[in-house]
Image: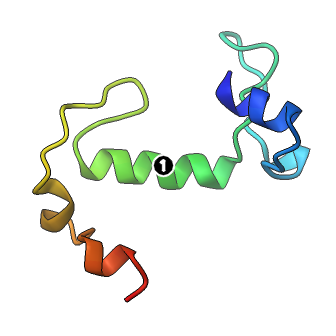
């Protein structure tokens, strides 16, 4: 729903051929770029979660997984 809204507002989310297509549960399509969904799923899995389950975030988790602020802020 959010991705479709963002697309309708003009945000380029990828070429139509690269978007997750319609499914039985979502006949209008998912409006998400397939490769981005893969990256998102991998990050969520690293933290023991998924698109449908996000556990409470421990602030130490980013450092434990090499995602501390020094690694992500461009320094």
Q: Residue at x 76, y 35 (%)?
A: 6
Residue 44, position in %: x, y?
A: 35, 45
Judge the density around disc 1: few (<14), some (14-19), many (≥20) Cα neighbours within 10 Å.
Answer: some
Quadrant assignment, res 26: top right
Q: Quadrant of the C terminus?
A: bottom left
Foreground residue, 20 or 71? 71
Q: Residue at x 12, y 45 (%)?
A: 58
Q: Residue at x 27, y 80 (%)?
A: 70
Quadrant assignment, res 73: bottom left
Under circle 1, the secondary element is: helix
How many numbered marks does the figure carry?
Answer: 1
The residue sitting at the bottom extreme is: 75
Q: Residue at x 77, y 28 (%)?
A: 4
Residue 62, position in %: x, y?
A: 21, 60
| Looking at the image, residue 63 lies above or below residue 39 | below
Whether residue 58 sits left or right of residue 15 in the image: it is left
Q: Quadrant of the N terminus?
A: top right
Foreground residue, 10 or 37? 10
Foreground residue, 73 or 31? 73
| Looking at the image, residue 64 lies above or below residue 5 | below
Q: Which residue is mark 1?
A: 40
| Looking at the image, residue 32 lies above or below residue 40 | above
Whether residue 45 sits left or right of residue 25 in the image: it is left
Whether residue 68 sits left or right of residue 24 in the image: it is left
Residue 74, position in %: x, y?
A: 43, 84
């Amino acid at each position: 729903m959010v991705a479709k809204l963002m697309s309708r507002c003009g945000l380029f989310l990828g070429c139509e051929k690269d978007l997750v297509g319609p499914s039985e549960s979502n006949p209008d399509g998912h409006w998400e770029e397939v490769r981005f969904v893969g990256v998102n799923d991998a990050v969520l899995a690293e933290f023991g979660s998924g698109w449908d389950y996000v556990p409470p975030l421990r602030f130490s988790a980013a450092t434990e997984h090499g995602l501390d602020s020094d690694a992500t802020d461009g320094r």
